[in-house]
Image (cartoon, helix red, strand yellow):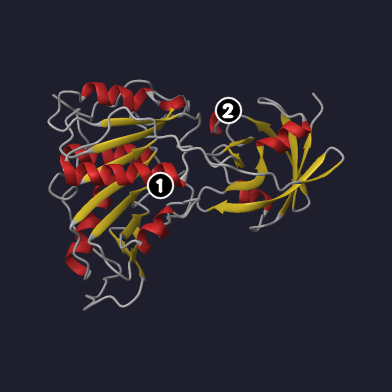
Amino acid sequence: MTKRPRFSKLLLTCGFLLSALPFLQAEQVLTGEIEGAKFELTLPENPSGKLLLLAHGYRPEGLPLAASVGESHDLYSNLVDDGWAVASTSYRRNGWILEDAALDLINLHDHIRENVAYEPTLVILMGNSMGGGVVTWLSEHEPQRFDGALAMGAYLFEPIGDSETPSTTLAPYYSGKPQFPILFLTNTSELEGPAAYVSMAAEAAIAPVLWTIDREGHVNQNEAEQGAALAALVNWVESGEIEPDADGTIHAATASTAVFEGDTAKGRAITLVPVYGNIITSFVREDFQRLGLELGDSFSLSAQGQTVSVKLGKTYTDVPVGDWVGFWDADGYLLICRNYKNAVATLGLPEDAPIEIQKQDP
């Protein structure tokens, strides 16, 4: 018998109830709380009837609850401009969570239908990492509420324990029987879970589809790639057709803006990723080639009067917990982070702050 998470009886209690709105005159951002889970709902000026529900990835238990999904690009705001309503939930708690996260998305969906003057005609789930696992589970159990799901870098294994060593076996609560279209968008370095699920579900009435991003990293995907996958998913829901096994890679062109003084490259922090505390810098591959930096090398990063040692890697887990790593994001810029820690808070870094990089001696 297939194991599944147990749901407690759904009792919807809102710490903040949205009043019914007779009509929408401009874009509105509404916030509230349902069973301890904070939420944020952005309603468009010109509604299309489409609703996107966002399922965020793992967050350490010590972080405050936040409805923001920690996006680093403009996809969601652009969707609102196109008439989508976009909603996100903090979940009621942080940590490795599936049962409660799924319930919080159900609660948020029902709350919007029952208390907000926005009538969805199409409801899409979009989840990354652990959130990709959550929307995969929902695809097997909630066809009445949701029409499709985009799972980006989906983590489909058992939760990581104290060893922080990921499992490589699909979690037993997945049946392989999705009841609505689900599209997996996955980088080449983390295909194992989604590929195993697609294989298990090959005979399902609505077989899932896997698109590959030809780039290493964890959910290392750009706005164009995610937007194209979302558009393909919507078309699949509406027409019943989608290209299977597609290459979803869309390469971005980036030019160097760094200023060089001797062996030092000067740039800036162009985006601070909320919640997770990562830093997207203005540095590009060309800058590191000029400094003679290669994959696996360490370099000094100086900002706000502090200097830290950073390893040039491919993803977050190339270094131990708490250590610094830099790698190229999907747009070709250098992303700086601390594995499972907050780089922005550590440096006290404001957006657009100057950053300097130097190659370290071996």
**Residue type marked 1:** Asn
Q: In the depicted view, which residue is nearer to us: 144 or 264? A: 264
136 shown above or below 25: above
Percent across and percent down for residue 285 are 66, 35
Percent across and percent down for residue 185 are 36, 35
Q: In the depicted view, which residue is nearer to us: 299 or 98? A: 299
Sequence-earlier tag: 1 or 2: 1
Q: Judging from the image, what secondary structure is the residue with disc 1 in?
A: loop
Tell me where residue 241 sits by quadrant: top left
* Mark 1 nearby-residue class (10 Å; few <14, some 14–19, many ≥20): some
Tell which residue pokes out farthest to the right in this image.
262
Mark 1 = which residue?
Answer: 94
Percent across and percent down for residue 73 are 49, 52
Q: In the depicted view, which residue is nearer to us: 187 or 229? A: 229
Query: How many angstroms separate mark 1 from mark 2 (CA)?
Result: 24 Å
16 shown above or below 289: below
Q: Judging from the image, what secondary structure is the residue with disc 2 in?
A: helix
Mark 2 = which residue?
Answer: 318
Mark 1–mark 2 contact, CB under 8 Å? Answer: no
In the image, what residue occupies the spot 66% across and 31% down?
312
**Residue type marked 2:** Asp
